[in-house]
Amino acid sequence: MVEEEEESLRVVRSGGSELSFRRAVFSADSKYIFCVSGDFVKVYSTATEECVHVLQGHRNLVTGIQLNPNNHLQLYSCSFDGTIKLWDYLDGILIKTFIVGHKLHALFTHANAEDSVFVTVNKEKPDVFQLVSVKLPKSSSQEVEAKELSFVLDYINQSPKCIAFGSEGEYVAAVRDFYLSVYFFKRKKTSRFTLSSSRNKKHAKNNFTCVTCHPKEDCIATGHKDGKIRLWRHFDDDKKYTYTCLHWHHDRVMDLAFSVTGTSLLSGGRESVLVEWRDAAEKNKEFLPRLGATIEHISVSPAGNLFCTSHSDNKIIVIHRNLEATAVIQGLVKDSSILTGLMIDPRTKALVLNGKPGHLQFYSLQSDKQLYNLDIVQQEYINDYGLIHSQLTRAAFGCSGNWLATVEQRQEKETELELQMKLWTYNKKTQGFVLNTKVNMPHEDHITALCFCNAEKHETPTLVTASKDGHFKVWILTDDSDIYKEAVGWTCDFMGSYHKYQATNCCFSEDGSLLAVSFEEIVTMWDSETWELKCTFCQRAGNIRHLCFGRLTCSKYLLGATENGILCCWNLLSCALEWSTKLNITVMEPDPNSENVAAVSKSSVGSDLFVFKPSESRPLYVQKNICREEVQWGVFVPRDVPESFTSEAHQWLNRSQFYFLTKSQSLLTFSTKSPEEKLTPTNKQLLAEESLPTTPFYFILGKHRQQQDEKLNETLENELVQLPLTENIPAISELLHTPAHVLPPASFLCSMFINSLLLSKKTKSTEEIPDDVDMEEEKESDSSDENDFTEKDQNTSTTDLAEDGEDIIHQLSKSEERELRKLRKVDYSWIAAL
């Protein structure tokens, strides 16, 4: 039972969470920047851009973070799980949890509010929010209930950008729709100011979008939907208030922030330009343009030397006070639609998918950061709703990552389709992809699929494209040299069709001998050498949605999933249907390192996972409701170091890890580890260094070391207890070989280190008993020995029995031990004289 609990497989977030969901927060010394990322809070270094800590503990989406005003080495966070947590961010340790009980949407702190923080909570109606004060009681226990809530403001916006606290915490300003509300804490009075509503066409876009307060003066700055910025003064009197306008943005103002001294106002929006208004005057403007995407949030460091902007493409840019970008923290770019699917770069093992418009992004799953962007379309992107841009729709890697094929399309009208296929070769000198061949209009209609032949025996690189125009084309790499230079290029070698049906999918068999192309409801098999049609499969169960061959021992099977919810498995040797089942499959991915195939089906509740071998109709593993939304893409990622799950149900994850992307573009995977174990790699993931480099010191001391090792091994073999060598203990290896700034806290490493030094209990060997024991003494001690032995058996745990089962099977009984001792005393020296 213990093993099952430890190895319960569960879905976990694998990174790629939105970094721009809330404003980032600087540490007091500007060395670190904190940002919300799904259920976690990430701590980044502003100098190196590296993630130094991941604060884990919340059980739902984190919705707010703020520095502790009374201790700048601590950080508050709130979440939908109804808790406020206090962290020591330098060590990544959770100090205390305050249980509020309500779903918390935003968090605010102020130095004058002693032992209290402010949160946004939801009332009974879905779109009605309140700002309340929460008193945090002092207690030595790690979990404390904080149920004392005080009402501050009603009818506020859910976004924390729409609430701001004034100088010295005297008032709080909140905006929603066409209203600005200001609550004065001392007077306990609320003033409300209204702008002209959308009924008047002239003031149709007066809506408030964000608010911020001057740090030293009584001045409130508000952003609006029409791009204007209003500066409010004398708002303590409902009749004498005034405001002035600043206007540069052509679209809505997304966020505002005053500098620490209040001499500058920062603004940003869809133009991807950070605007600094010096002395809040329209004539004194400074710009930092071309930031790449819409500015969602602006933050200012307490020291005043750094700004940062959070962007809609999941990016944070750290900016110096002189408006110079100094660091970029790039997460997984969330494109409007992932058309390329999920791919793995064979060279870097990075996840590859659509990124910025017209780009492919290479994303490291291990470090949870973007490696680089590859500009495919190579056109300037203009952020305007009315413009139609070229879209990157298909991509595929081939020949061990030496080649990359991409397809882009642009279509303004139904009859005006522009298609372009590009083939990129990997350049070892530049360590990147270089354009080799460009093909305009490779097909007459949309390209539905493309695949490379990646068989080792296939000498000529081959690419196949399928299209709605009813054809599939075979492209091969040919010699394109001339008198000026040696070169290679891609040309069309063969074009096939089947009764004018639309070609929807294509894939090669593992050995590259067969090509499968689906034409709506029919699957055709082609010989890859002669391009002859060998056979067809047709079940009339709807158009083929997914198509893939089996791997390794299951390479004789072909799998097809239809739009009508039927999964078919055909035997290529008998050319007959092996089995079929009713399953509405949205994702079907074969594991490149095993025979397993993962299929995700859509259900009324969410999505279910089925893992099976094509040779068997019964699945190896089933997990219902892996997520509540539709899974759109999935991919197997080969492991660097194989796992060794003891449970048979989980052995499909030994060689590869399965990642999947949901409709809301959350990247998820399966794990048996707790968050703490994920921080500290286990013995299975760490390999001790078997060989050291041959340095000059090695040549001097090498022989001496070898002799020492041989002597040590001899003595260890003769001893009963063999102590493990320190170089083979993964815990010590981790301590010595991991950079100090990325090591997890000592509390996590300590338990692993101590456990590695503990010795497992083993039964005493027969060699320990001396040979000259009298038989009479043996008889007298028989009863006591047997009692001791049974006690030891009872204390041995079930896991020890499982591990040391072989030793127990070969253990001698007491009578056999006595016989063995008798034989030892017999003199066999006469044999030497023969």
Image (spheres, grey):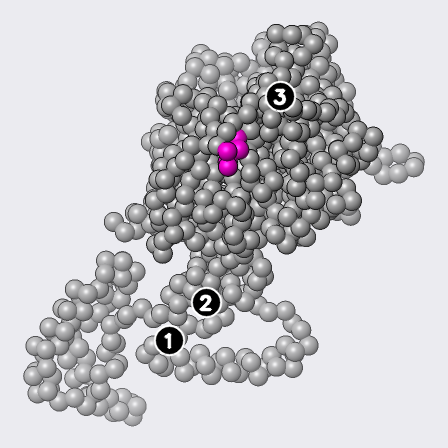
Disc 3 residue type?
A: Lys
Residue interval drawn in magenta: 183-187
Identity of the residue drawn at 38% across and 34% down: 102
> Label 1, on which residue?
722
Q: Is residue 685 above or below residue 667?
A: below
- Say which element carries label 1: loop
- Mark 3 → mark 1, Cα distance in angstroms: 87 Å
Sequence-first disc among 2 and 1: 1
- Say which element carries label 3: loop
Identity of the residue drawn at 41% across and 51% down: 96
Q: Which of the 4 image quadrants contains residue 281? A: top right
> Label 3, on which residue?
239
Q: Which of the 4 image quadrants contains residue 272? A: top right
Q: Position of residue 606 (x, y in %)?
A: 40, 25
Identity of the residue drawn at 46% across and 16% down: 563
- Say which element carries label 2: loop
Q: In front: 569, or 428?
A: 428
Disc 1 residue type?
A: Gln
- Mark 2 → mark 1, Cα distance in angstroms: 14 Å
Sequence-first disc among 3 and 1: 3
Find out whether the residues at labels 2 and 1 contact each other: C-beta distance under 8 Å: no
